[in-house]
Image: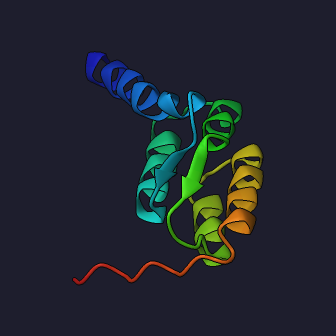
Amino acid sequence: MRIRLARVVGLIFVFALPGLAQQAISVEKLVEFIKSSVTEKLPDKEVAAQLVGYRLTSKLEDRVIEDLQHEGAGPRTVAALTKLADQSAKLVVAAPKPA
């Protein structure tokens, strides 16, 4: 229980800083955050609010949003992700990491 609480507090601390200014974040880190939020069962409203402070460094593809939705991202989070995808539309898609 303490480890879970520490993870949630850590996530909130790391991802709450964008409230001061937009934080540049990679699509990979964004996906990691959303998956962690789903695993930790963070409220959809809070996750979506965190996404407002992000600026992506590469293009967020619709396929990624669909995958996150299927993995449990809520409707507000999906709407915020769609907005990020629109904002990142002119950016280059990040190259996949080598296996």
91 over 35 or under it: above or below:
below
Which is more toward the observer, 65 or 28?
Answer: 28
Relative side of 73 to 93, left or right = right
Estimate the x, y position of residue 46 in percent, counting from the top left: 64, 30
Residue located 67% across and 37% down the image:
44
Estimate the x, y position of residue 45 in percent, counting from the top left: 71, 33
Relative side of 47 to 5, left or right = right
Estimate the x, y position of residue 71 in percent, counting from the top left: 56, 58
Quarter of the figure that contains the C terminus: bottom left
Relative side of 25 to 98, left or right = right
Relative side of 13 to 23, left or right = left
Estimate the x, y position of residue 51 in percent, counting from the top left: 62, 44
To which quarter of the image does residue 63 belong?
A: bottom right
Quarter of the figure that contains the N terminus: top left
Q: Residue furthest left?
A: 99
To which quarter of the image does residue 52 belong?
A: top right
63 over 31 or under it: above or below:
below
Residue located 51% across and 28% down the image:
16
